Image (spheres, helix red, strand yellow):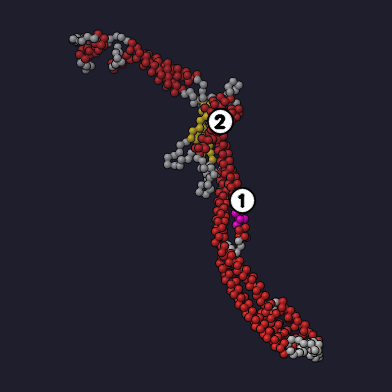
Amino acid sequence: MIRNGDISASDIKRILHKHWWILALTTVIGVVLGLGAAYVLPKKFTSQTLVLVDSPTVSADLVKPVVSEASNQRLASMKEQILSRSRLQPVIEKFNLYPGDRGKVHIEDLVERLKKGIEVTALEPMPGTQRQLPGFHVSVTFGDPQNAQRICSEVTTMFMEQNAKYIDDRSTQTTDFFAQQADEAKRKLDEQDAQLAEFKKKYMGSLPDQEQTNLSLLAGMNTQLDAITQAMTRTQQDKSLNESLLASQIALFKSTGSSYTSPDTLEQQLSNLQDQLATLESRYTADHPDVIKTRSQIEQLKKRMASAPQQSTTPATAPGSTVEPPSIQQLRAKLRQDELAIADLSKRQTQVQNQINVLQGRIQSSPAVEQQFKELTRSYQSALDFYNDLLKTHAQAEMSRDINRQQGGEQFRVLDPPNLPTSPSFPKKSLFAGGGLGAGLALGLALIYGLAFLDGSMHTERDVEVCMKLPVLTMVPDIIPAARAETNGKAGRPAGLAGAQA
């Protein structure tokens, strides 16, 4: 009997010796029930495939990939898309899955049932390598092995097509984005270029790189102005001198009151014209109108003299007319030349002074113009650098897109095609038989313990003490017959111990 839950090894041995058949019976029943359940339950077949993630064939140092998202993140995103209703419902219709439930069960329930049978498991990267997804398993569990293989192949194809489409779309979007940005940058660069050209046109001559030229031109203009000023001063002095000489000659001529008949012959006219030409040539160039006019008059006079060689000197005026002496006429001619020279020098002086004022204005405004020019140049250079960077990035994006389209980028590659399962993955007979065995053993032990707990019979001295609650005064030893003692002695066991056990 069991009291207070205490049980000894001898009690266990005695109980098992008495009720061993219960344990054997429950074990056999458990195994039979497990095998029966494995035979009765609907069978499921699992088709598997292994997909590897191939790294790009072109190094990222040469062509930077446009898809920077990690493969495991991309796989999780594609898994959500592929296992959605819009992608699984065509699979159900394509392979005519669940024909008996198509009209009874809602399509969403069928999609959810198929989704539960598809499992995508990512492979763990090797220790010490980059945290990049090496590949993944696709497992499809279905009641028919052929359909399981077809569904696994279809899902794997969907993953590969989705990955290729995702990379191509991202590459195209990136390329188009950089193309738009490059066009916008080109437009802004053209605006900056137009502003810079307009600024150069507006401040032509005042730009920073023309400052030294302006200073050199200003020095030359100042020197030219000084020379013109000195020439004008000398001409004005000559004019003052000739005016005073003319005034004195006229006063002398009027004071004498003499009548002078001019001997202005052709020779005298030629001599006067030649003197006048010499004076003009000393002041002007050969292309000056007065020089050209005087030369023409000299040529005409020479022709007249050549046509009348025998003509004698005749008075230029009628008898009795009073004319000024040649000296006064020469002085008047010099005064006219001086006036023309002063007018020309004044005009040139004004022109040079205006040019000097323009140069001085350019030099004075040069710091402000230089500051504005630097700002425009800096903005233009920034826009140019940004445009060149965008062109370079756009070229790299196009190159990366072309590499992906030529299967040179990161690709999914099927290492093991979906297999055709020959044995069901559920239920496993060995697992069910082992489960039935364990359940039978547990049930048998529970039954035996319950029977032992309910058993009130006494088998040992301790049972008597516990049950009767009386002290033991003495114990009567077992009396062993001689023959049995000899047998025990031959066996090497003490007689007292053998009697106690009996």
Compared with 419, 408 (above or below) is below
* Left or right of residue 228, residue 77 in this image: left
Q: Is residue 194 magenta-colored?
A: yes
Position of residue 278 relative to residue 408, above or below, is below
| Residue lying at 57% horizontally and 58% vertically, measured from the top left | 373
Q: Secondary structure at mark 1?
A: helix
Is 174 placed above or below 9 here? below
Q: Position of residue 214 (x, y in %)?
A: 58, 67
Q: Position of residue 484 (x, y in %)?
A: 22, 11
Callout 2, which amino acid? Ser
- Tell me which label, 1 or 2, sits earlier in the chain: 2
Please say if 89 is above or below 312. above
Query: Would you say 494 lies left or right of 44 here?
Result: left
> Which tag is nearer the camera, tag 1 or tag 2?
1
Task: Please state, as top left, top right, bottom left or bottom right, where the C terminus lies in the image.
Answer: top left
Amino acid identity at mark 1: Arg
Q: Position of residue 424 (x, y in %)?
A: 50, 25
In this view, the residue in front, 361 or 76, is 361
Disc 2, SS: loop
Residue 187 badge: 1
Bin the neighbour count of mark 2 within 10 Å (Cα to Cα): few under 14, some 14-19, many 20 and up.
Answer: some
What residue sits right under mark 2 in the picture? Answer: 84
